[in-house]
Structure formats: structure tokens, C-alpha cells
């Protein structure tokens, strides 16, 4: 800045240039230092009043000087009223108020301060090991500056602040996502120069009426993400200077009624996208908005846009003369002559620089489904009497399978097939019942028995086999057999006995394990039954082998004793 190197004004000699006077009153005394319009470029190095009089209020005015940067104010333990109006002030140093913790009033109006200049560490006291000490400021005047926005924590070190003036600043005010349902008129009664207002993400059922107090200053308004069901002529009453309007992402918005935008003469951008239930939108009132440049209507439930036909007049102004951007994608458009007429009024393809979204397509009627809206200008939708630009006549018939007769025939065919199927099923069931009652059924009943029941209770498989073989052997003459034939006969007997042994083992083992492990016979075995059977068979085989070895050893001992 120009005054960064400017020396501080001398403190003790300040009264030679400024007016200094003591005003004593019964309750409090004021020491006035009036340096208004003295061609000063900085604040003094110290205050001219004597120390030790802390009950005196110091009133210092440096208004009307050219002080571009407010440097650190001189130290004082007195209460301070400080004013620097019309100082062409552009910057405030971070430590400007460190040495004046008892400053009560601060007037910095009519300067060139911005939101970037006023930071969260501008209004604070000294650092006290853990935190910054607060200052005693109660009144702060920042009106008539260039403040568009303020940091959220800019006043965190001003716990006693009671009065704040931000009038006549081009403010950007953010009330978004605060759960608001109303805005009192008192907030906008002073009519500051509020340029931009954010109200999205709240609980407004309608556009707040208090916004009409901002009609002369408000340029941008965001009211999306609110549970508003309809917008009417009264919604934006008085907002004649509005340039940017956003009414997007409203899940309950059903309709934008007639004349909703008729008073927004300076509107340039209208965004009404992502309103999933919005089925009606007033385009007719946009006809009178000669400044409209962008119109966004994507991702809604619009089927058509209706605009009244105009009588051709060579002297009449063209509608939508400045419209350059039109977005209509992701809507269930019903393409007919009315929609085509509206598109021709909106798009004016002869204009240079016009852009229309090429993803918007027809949904109905059937024979136009999927066609781009930009291609409708080659389709025969309107007669010569309806529209001179498209002389062809549309002939639309639904597809054969969508005609009423075809639908009825399909329904009756399905019913007949179901009835025939039921009749065939009933006949099969009746035939099965009769066959079960007769002796010539296709299957015989299955009888479940144990292995033990399959053998005689008096004859074991081994004795049965040996008896049958012995009967056959007795019929033969032993003297007629050679030694080789006798050995072969003995081998055959041993094999038959071994087979009988195995069958007996299998039968007993199956019977024992079946009774022990299977309580409820079924079509399959579960895991516990399989495990039980495996363990049972293992134990039974071990026992059988032990008995067999013991019996063989006993036989061998008896033979040796003979």
C-alpha cells in the first residue's frame, strides 16, 4: 500500500494539528481528540492524554483523512470510541486492536473494505498462552463498504457485540441448510444492498414474502431444496431486478403456475432442473422476459410446454431474443404440434451461438418414441392451418399389439390355456386314483424290512450253504475222486464258507447299526446318522476280527494237543 512506509503521527504534538479537549460530566468524562480532515495518513504513536485516568472515555475521530491502511492503535487502558469514516480505508492490520482491549465503539463506514480484508483474526486482543483475549467492542459500523461476504468466525472474539451495521454493502447472504421455515420482515427492513441470497436446504413451504423488501437490490436468489409444492404469481412479487433465479431440487414441486415470472423483467438465467414431480411449467410468462439468456428444465416430469400462438406482425419484436441456452433432457415429452410450436418459439435456429441440448427425446406417441426433439422439425406434426412452417399432416395409429381388440384377444387366449391346463391336470389325478384302487397299478407298494428278516430265524447263511454243498457232495462217490479233485473240492468248500461268513457278517452288522443309528428312516441320511453308522461298522469289524483271531488260535491249540 502507499502508506505502508508512512511514519506514525507524533503523539504529544497531535493536539497542535487536531482539536483536543476534556469534557467533564457528572457520571463520566470524555477526552476528545478530533483529527477529522487534517490531511493525515496514519494514526499517532500515542494518545495525548495523561496516564492514570482510566475512568475517562477517549473519543478519537480521524474521519475525512486519507488513511489507506489502519495500523496498530496506540496503547491505552481507557475506554475508547474510535471513528475513521471517509478515510479511503482498504486494509486493516491483524494487530490493529491489540493494545486497545477496552474499545467500545468502532465506526469504519464509508470506506473501501471488502470481505477479504475482514478476517477472523482482525478483531481480537492479545494472545494469552492458550487463546486470544477478547475485546470489549459493543458497536461496529461497517456500512457503505464493498463487503460481499464475511467469514463465519469473524466475530468470535467480540462476545459483547450488540450493534452491527452492514447497510449498503453488496452482501452475499447465506441462509442455506439452517432449518428455517420463515424469515421475519425485520431482517430486511433497513433494505441493505443485498445482492445474493441463498435459502436452499430449508423448510420453506412457500417463497418468503419478506423478500419483496429486497426488490431493488437483490440480483441472485437460490430457493431450491425446499418443500414448496407450487409457485404462483405472488411468489416473486417485487423482485423486479432479479437476474439469476434457481428453483431446482425441490421434491414436492408440482406446478409453476401462470404469470409466475411475469414481473422479473431483468431475469437472465432461470434454473428449474431436477424437480421430479413438476409436470407443469409456465413458459408463456417467459415470453415477456427480453433479457432471458438461459433456461434449464431438465430432469423433471414435463410432457409438454404450451405457448399461445401469435398473429404474424412484421413490426412486433421477436420473443426470447437473447435466449442462447435451452436444456430439456430427461423429461417424458409427448411430441405433438403444440410442443413443436413452443420449441420453434424458443429455439430460433437461425440465431448464431444458440445451443439446445441434443439429448432431449420424445417418449410418446409410440411411433415418435426416441426421436430427438431437434429432429421434430422434419416430422409431419401440424397442418397448414395450425402451423405454416410444417405443411404435412400427422397420421398416428398405435401398434397392432396395442389395439383394444388385440389386447382382448390376448387376454382370452391366456384364460383358455389356463382352463385347458386345469382340465388336463384334473383328468390325470382321477386316472391315478382309479389305478391305485385296482390290482393293475403301475407300481407295487414298497415294504421296508431289516436284513435280519431276510434270513430264516433257524438257519444261518453259512449253515445253509454248507448243507446244500454237502448234499451235492454225498451224491458223488468219494472213491472215484482223485487227489486233485479232492483238493479242488476242499477249496470250493472253503470259498463257499468264506462267502457265507461275509454274508452273515454283513447282515448282522447292518441290523445292529441300523437299529442303533437310524431312528426315523427316510430317503437320505443326515450327517449325524452317517457318522454313527461309520463308527458302528468300524467297531463291529474290529470286534469280529478279534473274535475270529481268538477262535482260530484256539483251534490251532486243540489240534496241537491231539
Image (spheres, rainbow, N blue to C red):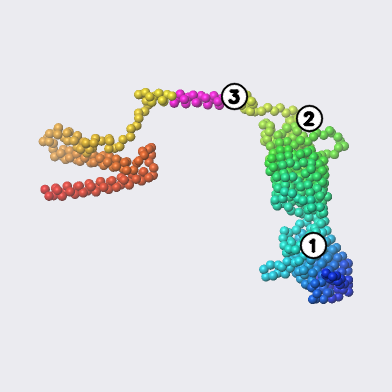
Q: Residue 245, percent across and down?
A: 76, 47
What residue did someone put label 2 on? 386
Near mark 1 (Cα within 10 A), the count class, few <14, some 14-19 or many ≥20, is: some
Residue 414 in magenta stretch: yes
Quick one: label 2 or label 3, which is nearer the N terminus? 2
State which region is magenta: 410-429
Give the vertical position of 91 relative to 277 (above or below): below
Quick one: label 2 or label 1, which is nearer the N terminus? 1
Q: Is residue 528 visible?
A: yes
Residue 77 in magenta stretch: no
Q: Residue at (30%, 47%) from the top-left corner?
A: 538
Q: Residue 31, percent across and down?
A: 84, 71
Q: Residue 397, percent across and down?
A: 68, 27
Q: Which mark is residue 140?
A: 1
Answer with the quarter of the image where residue 513 lies: top left
- Our reading of the magenta stretch's main secondary structure is helix
| Contact between labelled residues 1 and 2, with CB atoms less than 8 Å apart | no
What residue did someone put label 3 on? 409
Q: Residue at (17%, 33%) from the top-left corner?
A: 472
Q: Is residue 488 visible?
A: no
Q: Residue at (87%, 73%) from the top-left corner?
A: 15
Q: Secondary structure at mark 2?
A: loop
Q: Residue at (34%, 43%) from the top-left corner?
A: 517
Q: Nearer the viewer, residue 185 or 431?
A: 185
Which of the two marks, 1 or 3, is nearer to us in this view? Answer: 1
Q: Which mark is residue 93?
A: none
Q: Secondary structure at mark 1?
A: strand
Near mark 3 (Cα within 10 A), the count class, few <14, some 14-19 or many ≥20, is: few
Give the vertical position of 214 relative to 283 (above or below): below
Amino acid at each position: 500500500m502507499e502508506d505502508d512506509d508512512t511514519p506514525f503521527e507524533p503523539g504529544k504534538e497531535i493536539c497542535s494539528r487536531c482539536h483536543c479537549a476534556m469534557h467533564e460530566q457528572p457520571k463520566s468524562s470524555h477526552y476528545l481528540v478530533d483529527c477529522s480532515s487534517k490531511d493525515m495518513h496514519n494514526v499517532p504513536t500515542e494518545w495525548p492524554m495523561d496516564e492514570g485516568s482510566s475512568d475517562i472515555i477517549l473519543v478519537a475521530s480521524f474521519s475525512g483523512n486519507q488513511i489507506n491502511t489502519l495500523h496498530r492503535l496506540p496503547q491505552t487502558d481507557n475506554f475508547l470510541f474510535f471513528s475513521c469514516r471517509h478515510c479511503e480505508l482498504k486494509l486493516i492490520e491483524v494487530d490493529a486492536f491489540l493494545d486497545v482491549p477496552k474499545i467500545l465503539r468502532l465506526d469504519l463506514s464509508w470506506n473501501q473494505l471488502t470481505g477479504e480484508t475482514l478476517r477472523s483474526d482482525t478483531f481480537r486482543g492479545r494472545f494469552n498462552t492458550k487463546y486470544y483475549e477478547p475485546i470489549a467492542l459493543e458497536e461496529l459500523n461497517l456500512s457503505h463498504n464493498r463487503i460481499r461476504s464475511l467469514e463465519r468466525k469473524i466475530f468470535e472474539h467480540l462476545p459483547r457485540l450488540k450493534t452491527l451495521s452492514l447497510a449498503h454493502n453488496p452482501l452475499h447472504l447465506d441462509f442455506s441448510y439452517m432449518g428455517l421455515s420463515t424469515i421475519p420482515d425485520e431482517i430486511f427492513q433497513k433494505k441493505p444492498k443485498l445482492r445474493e441470497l441463498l435459502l436452499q436446504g430449508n423448510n420453506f413451504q412457500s417463497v418468503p414474502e419478506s423478500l419483496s423488501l429486497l426488490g431493488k437490490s437483490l440480483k441472485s436468489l437460490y430457493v431450491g431444496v425446499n418443500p414448496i409444492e407450487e409457485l404462483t404469481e405472488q411468489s416473486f412479487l417485487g423482485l423486479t431486478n432479479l437476474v439469476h433465479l434457481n428453483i431446482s431440487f425441490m421434491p414436492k414441486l408440482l406446478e409453476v403456475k401462470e404469470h409466475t415470472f411475469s414481473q422479473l423483467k431483468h431475469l437472465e438465467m432461470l434454473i428449474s432442473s431436477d424437480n421430479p414431480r413438476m409436470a407443469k411449467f409456465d413458459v408463456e410468462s417467459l415470453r415477456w422476459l427480453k433479457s432471458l439468456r438461459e433456461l434449464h428444465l431438465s430432469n423433471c416430469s414435463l410432457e409438454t410446454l404450451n405457448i399461445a400462438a401469435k398473429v404474424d406482425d412484421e413490426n412486433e419484436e421477436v420473443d426470447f431474443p437473447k435466449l442462447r441456452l435451452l436444456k430439456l433432457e430427461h423429461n417424458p415429452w409427448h411430441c405433438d404440434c403444440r410442443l413443436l410450436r413452443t420449441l420453434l418459439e424458443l429455439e430460433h435456429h437461425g440465431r448464431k451461438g444458440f445451443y439446445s441440448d441434443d439429448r432431449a427425446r420424445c417418449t410418446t406417441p409410440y411411433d415418435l418414441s426416441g426421436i430427438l426433439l431437434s429432429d421434430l422439425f422434419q416430422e409431419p406434426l401440424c397442418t397448414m392451418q395450425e402451423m405454416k412452417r410444417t405443411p404435412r399432416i400427422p397420421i398416428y395409429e398405435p401398434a397392432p399389439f396395442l389395439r383394444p381388440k388385440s389386447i382382448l384377444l390376448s387376454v382370452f387366449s391366456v384364460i383358455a390355456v389356463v382352463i385347458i391346463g386345469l382340465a388336463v391336470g384334473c383328468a390325470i389325478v382321477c386316472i391315478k386314483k382309479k389305478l391305485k384302487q385296482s390290482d393293475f397299478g403301475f407300481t407295487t407298494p414298497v415294504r421296508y424290512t431289516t436284513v435280519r428278516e431276510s434270513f430264516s430265524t433257524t438257519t444261518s447263511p453259512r449253515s445253509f450253504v454248507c448243507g446244500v454243498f454237502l448234499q451235492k457232495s454225498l451224491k458223488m462217490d468219494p472213491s472215484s475222486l482223485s487227489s486233485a479233485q479232492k483238493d479242488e473240492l476242499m477249496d470250493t468248500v472253503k470259498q463257499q464258507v468264506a462267502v457265507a461268513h461275509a454274508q452273515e457278517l454283513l447282515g448282522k452288522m447292518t441290523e445292529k447299526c441300523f437299529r442303533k443309528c437310524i431312528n426315523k428312516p427316510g430317503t437320505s441320511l443326515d450327517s449325524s446318522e452317517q457318522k454313527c453308522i461309520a463308527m458302528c461298522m468300524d467297531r463291529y469289524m474290529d470286534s469280529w476280527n478279534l473274535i475270529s483271531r481268538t477262535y482260530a488260535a484256539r483251534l490251532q491249540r486243540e489240534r496241537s494237543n491231539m
